[in-house]
Image: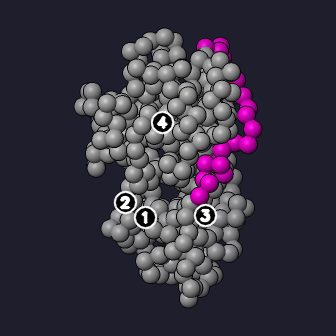
């Protein structure tokens, strides 16, 4: 196999073997702790502009199953300990290396991913480059920044997805980089979903007269999306709203709160979240590098969920505005499914249950 290098912004260099597409990959290096679900990870638009490192040591063992894709692959690179070249699964269509090549994603295998993950945990998320030779000039690594990520991840034009079975409600979904399972969770509950580009004006959303508004996940720094925040200010209180991940963060900004970048983020399918009302702990799927500052929401919203590891904000309720949001992913396609009930709560709100 061709030799390749992972070069970090702190000067660390890891030698490995090339996988995926030829050429360099430059991006923000993040790690995810999922033991499965690599297809859902690679096709999650929230990874736009980032190099993904899998902490689980063997990746690709069940191949590529296109039915499991969540969206477009927008990753800038892929880092694994060992890539399986001969997948064994009755649903497998082809191997993961071909997936990376077909989508122009450069990757590297055969490096100590545990050491890299520990470095990120200690020093924080940093930029990196996958390349054939360690560059003498690393200024491009230091200068890189994820920009215009939501515009890249969102749909280009509006489209509608019919309800499965009898239609109960119509939902407008603002697509900031939506995962496909958000739509599936709504349609299987009898919702007709109209998916809208991220920059749809509030007036156009309301003109559809939907029963509710869904705010999707998405990539990048939430504070960059000034236009989206301004539109949400016009929508809050006008109809039932449910926000996930970036949708959660943008809603907090629209309400007057603040967001902050986490040291290394929460990415993986094993993030513990505690419900403050019941004390129950849920295991959730997450993928975010920013969080809402809980203190900034005092008097604006009620904190509903917190991360059991670091205490960061995981959910907010806006009872006077008919809105609730969560930082984690209740639609997690690869699992866990502990919090899918939140979609039922959204339907209850659209059905007129003010206490949902």
Question: Residue at label 1?
Answer: 125
Which badge, 1 or 4, is on the more N-terminal residue?
Answer: 1
Which badge, 2 or 1, is on the more N-terminal residue?
Answer: 1
Residue 182 seen in the current view = no
Marks 2 and 1 close (CB-CB < 8 Å): yes
Tell me the SS state at disc 1: loop
Quadrant including the N terminus: bottom right
Tell me the SS state at disc 4: helix
What residue is drawn where x is 35% and y is 69%?
A: 123
Question: Residue at label 2?
Answer: 263
Quadrant including the C terminus: top left
Question: Mark 3 to mark 1: distance in Å?
Answer: 15 Å
Marks 2 and 3 close (CB-CB < 8 Å): no
Residue 235 spot, x, y in % from top left: 55, 27
Q: Which residues are magenta?
A: 147-168
Number of on-image labels:
4
* Discs 1/4, front: 4
Question: Residue at label 3?
Answer: 76
What residue is drawn where x is 66% and y is 33%?
A: 201
Residue 19 appears in which quarter of the rendering? bottom right
Residue 336 spot, x, y in % from top left: 43, 40
């Amino acid at each position: 196999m061709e030799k390749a290098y992972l070069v970090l912004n702190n000067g660390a260099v890891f030698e490995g073997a090339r996988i995926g597409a030829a050429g360099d990959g430059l991006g923000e290096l993040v790690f995810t702790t999922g033991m499965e679900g690599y297809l859902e990870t690679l096709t999650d638009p929230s990874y736009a502009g980032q190099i993904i490192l899998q902490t689980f040591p063997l990746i690709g063992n069940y191949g590529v199953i296109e039915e499991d894709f969540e969206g477009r692959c927008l990753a800038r690179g892929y880092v694994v300990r060992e890539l399986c070249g001969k997948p064994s699964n009755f649903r497998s269509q082809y191997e993961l290396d071909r997936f990376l090549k077909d989508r122009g994603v450069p990757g590297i295998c055969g490096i100590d991913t545990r050491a890299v993950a520990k470095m990120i945990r200690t020093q924080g998320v940093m930029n990196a480059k996958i390349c054939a030779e360690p560059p003498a000039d690393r200024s491009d690594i230091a200068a890189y920044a994820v920009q215009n990520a939501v515009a890249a991840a969102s749909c280009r034009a509006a489209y509608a997805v019919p309800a499965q079975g009898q239609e109960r409600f119509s939902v407008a979904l603002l697509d900031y980089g939506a995962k496909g399972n958000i739509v599936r969770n709504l349609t299987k509950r009898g919702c007709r979903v109209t998916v809208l580009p991220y920059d749809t004006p509030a007036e156009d959303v309301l003109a559809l007269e939907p029963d509710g508004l869904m705010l999707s996940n998405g990539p990048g720094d939430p504070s960059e999306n000034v236009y989206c925040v301004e539109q949400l200010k016009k929508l809050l209180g006008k109809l039932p709203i449910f926000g996930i991940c970036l949708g959660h963060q943008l809603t907090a900004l629209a309400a007057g709160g603040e967001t902050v970048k986490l040291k290394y983020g929460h990415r993986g399918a094993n993030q513990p979240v505690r419900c403050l009302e019941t004390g129950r702990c849920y295991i959730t799927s997450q993928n975010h590098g920013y969080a809402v500052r809980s203190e900034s929401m005092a008097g604006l919203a009620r904190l509903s969920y917190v991360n059991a590891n670091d205490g960061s904000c995981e959910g907010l309720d806006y009872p006077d505005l008919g809105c609730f949001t969560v930082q984690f992913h209740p639609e997690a396609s690869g699992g866990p499914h502990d919090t899918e009930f939140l979609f039922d709560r959204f339907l209850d709100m659209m059905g007129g249950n003010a206490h949902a």
